[in-house]
């Protein structure tokens, strides 16, 4: 539901500047968190404890996802990790765009579709 509200505000309002960027970043963080959870579902308990990028590597090896989708999932995770101030290496002003948001949303949708196709 939160993502629906974020999407509505981004698409249907004239929000601009830093406030818009903050909302985009928050939406990407949310989508990254959902993606992280989804990477754990098809794995064994021991594999679930591996790092995110190890899990996406495994999913690619097992042909659950493509190399391109893995690259996008890893981008999503790297972008999501910018919510930790101590990991941010650049000035974020003017950094987040609707293209980033759209890429994150497409990545999560593609991941969901890949999981559905593989396991059903």
Image (cartoon, rainbow, N blue to C red):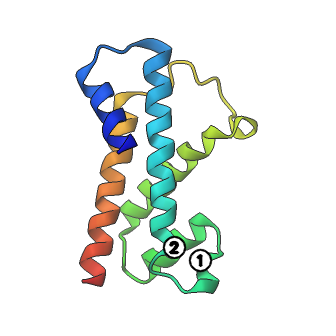
Locate residue 114 relative to residue 54 in the image: left or right: left
Visible in this render: residue 96?
A: no
Locate residue 115 relative to residue 88 in the image: left or right: left
Residue 20 falls in image quadrant:
top left
Choose the circle earlier in sequence order: 1 or 2.
2
Q: CA distance from mark 1 to mark 2?
A: 5 Å
SS for callout 2: helix
51 in relation to 30, above or below: below
Who's the residue at 43% across and 31% down the image? 24
Pointer 2 local density, CA inside 10 Å: few below 14, some 14–19, many at least 20: some
Of 51 and 38, the residue lying toward us: 38
Residue 76, image x and y in percent? 48, 49
Q: Which residue is mark 1?
A: 48
Mark linked to residue 89 = none
Who's the residue at 42% across and 54% down the image? 72
Of 4 and 43, the residue lying toward us: 4
Who's the residue at 57% across and 48% down the image? 78
98 in relation to 61, above or below: above
Pointer 1 local density, CA inside 10 Å: few below 14, some 14–19, many at least 20: some
Visible in this render: residue 17?
A: yes
Residue 107, image x and y in percent? 35, 53
SS for callout 1: helix
Q: Are marks 1 and 2 in contact (CB under 8 Å)?
A: yes
Residue 114, image x and y in percent? 30, 70
Mark linked to residue 40 = 2
Quarter in which the N terminus is drawn:
top left
């Amino acid at each position: 539901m939160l993502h629906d509200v974020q999407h509505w505000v981004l698409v249907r309002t004239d929000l601009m500047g830093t406030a818009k960027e903050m909302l985009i970043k928050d939406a990407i963080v949310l989508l990254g968190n959902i993606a992280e959870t989804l990477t754990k579902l098809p794995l064994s308990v021991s594999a679930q404890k591996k790092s995110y990028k190890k899990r996406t590597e495994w999913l690619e090896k097992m042909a659950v996802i493509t190399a391109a989708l893995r690259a996008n999932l890893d981008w999503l995770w790297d972008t999501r990790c910018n919510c930790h101030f101590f990991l941010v290496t650049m000035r974020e002003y003017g950094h987040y765009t609707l293209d980033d948001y759209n890429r994150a949303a497409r990545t999560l949708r593609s991941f969901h579709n890949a999981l559905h196709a593989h396991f059903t």
